[in-house]
Image (spheres, rainbow, N blue to C red):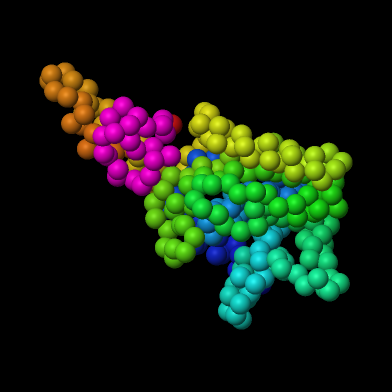
């Protein structure tokens, strides 16, 4: 029952949301391992992070994708508890455990990995400010140490913190980047693993500026058409002896007069200030 609920929820709600509202630029999607157990370690800025990460996997593999989430936040009432555990399939953990508690907070996560599931974990521990990476907590290292044969796949998410910031209830259109890094193995010590993960996170913004990946979403298609129209209009303006800047009423281009780009903000922004970052 839970398996079919999850498939229908993602097929009918989550994926249309991602398709219509978000334009995802996905790089190295092939590094995800839907058929094998793995630990997805991603930065965390929005509630959309989990949904977008899960939407990258085939529908038939969703029952094997288990996000780790805080029980004190996602299990505050019966309806929310039912939705998060039965539909999303979270693994609840206690973030602030009592000093005299004798339970293992990672026991259910251990069981899921042993069962062959893929775990989604956010090493920062909580949502941070949009597009800012916080200090990683060592909980992920303890988990990897227990399962050294399971690869850890680092994923960098950009833009979701602006599409649905902390404290907001409705998403807004933003182009979002998903960069899937190369799997990281267990080096033998916790400190060395955290150093590797920290080094990867430092390089994430630079990775984002590299060649684009596969962009999905209706907004991405609309942006592409706007760019073609802008270029055509700009060429006509130049041939008529006019200023190409007048053509910048068409947003979403790489024109030097248009500040729109995946790092600059909302769709339909056409103020003339700085050069944009190429979208394609």
The C terminus appears in which quarter of the rendering?
Answer: top left
Q: Is residue 250 magenta?
A: no
Residue 122, position as x, y percentages in the image: 65, 54
- Depicted 44 relative to depicted 74: above or below: above
Please identify the quarter of the rendering in which residue 183 is found: top right
Left or right, 186 with reference to 270: right
Query: What residue is shown at x 55% (from left), y 36% (from top)?
Result: 205
Query: What residue is shown at x 13% (from left), y 23% (from top)?
Result: 242
Left or right, 70 with reference to 107: left
Q: Chief secondary structure of the magenta span?
A: loop
Query: What residue is shown at x 66% (from left), y 37% (from top)?
Result: 200
Residue 256, position as x, y percentages in the image: 31, 27
Residue 114, position as x, y percentages in the image: 84, 57
Residue 4, position as x, y percentages in the image: 63, 67
Q: Between residue 72 and residue 279, name the one nearer to us.
A: 72
Specify whether residue 120 is in view. no
Left or right, 175 with reference to 3: left
Residue sticking out furthest to the bottom: 78
Specify whether residue 45 is in view. yes
Query: What residue is shown at x 65% (from left), y 72% (from top)?
Result: 72
Q: How many marks?
A: 0
What are the residue bounds of the magenta stretch? 255-279
The N terminus appears in which quarter of the rendering?
Answer: bottom right
């Amino acid at each position: 029952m839970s398996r079919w609920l999850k498939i229908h929820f993602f097929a009918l709600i989550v994926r249309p949301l991602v398709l219509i509202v978000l334009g995802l630029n996905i790089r190295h999607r092939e590094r995800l391992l839907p058929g094998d157990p793995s630990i997805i370690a991603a930065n965390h800025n929005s509630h959309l992070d989990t949904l977008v990460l899960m939407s990258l996997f085939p529908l038939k593999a969703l029952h094997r994708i288990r996000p780790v989430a805080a029980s004190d936040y996602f299990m505050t009432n019966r309806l929310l508890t039912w939705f998060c555990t039965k539909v999303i399939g979270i693994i609840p953990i206690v973030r602030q455990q009592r000093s005299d508690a004798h339970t293992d907070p990672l026991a259910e996560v251990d069981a899921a990995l042993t069962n062959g599931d893929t775990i989604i974990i956010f090493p920062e521990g909580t949502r941070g400010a949009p597009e800012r990476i916080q200090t990683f907590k060592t909980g992920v290292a303890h988990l990897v140490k227990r399962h050294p044969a399971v690869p850890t796949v680092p994923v960098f998410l950009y833009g979701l913190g602006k599409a649905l910031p902390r404290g907001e209830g409705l998403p807004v259109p933003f182009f979002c980047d998903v960069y899937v890094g190369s799997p990281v193995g267990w080096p033998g010590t916790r400190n060395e693993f955290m150093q590797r993960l920290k080094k990867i996170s430092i390089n994430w913004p630079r990775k984002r500026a590299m060649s684009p990946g596969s962009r999905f979403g209706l907004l991405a298609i609309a942006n592409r058409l706007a760019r073609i129209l802008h270029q055509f209009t700009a060429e006509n303006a130049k041939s008529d002896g006019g200023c190409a800047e007048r053509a910048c009423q068409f947003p979403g281009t790489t024109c030097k007069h248009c500040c729109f780009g995946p790092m600059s903000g909302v769709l339909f922004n056409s103020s003339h200030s700085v050069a944009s970052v190429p979208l394609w």
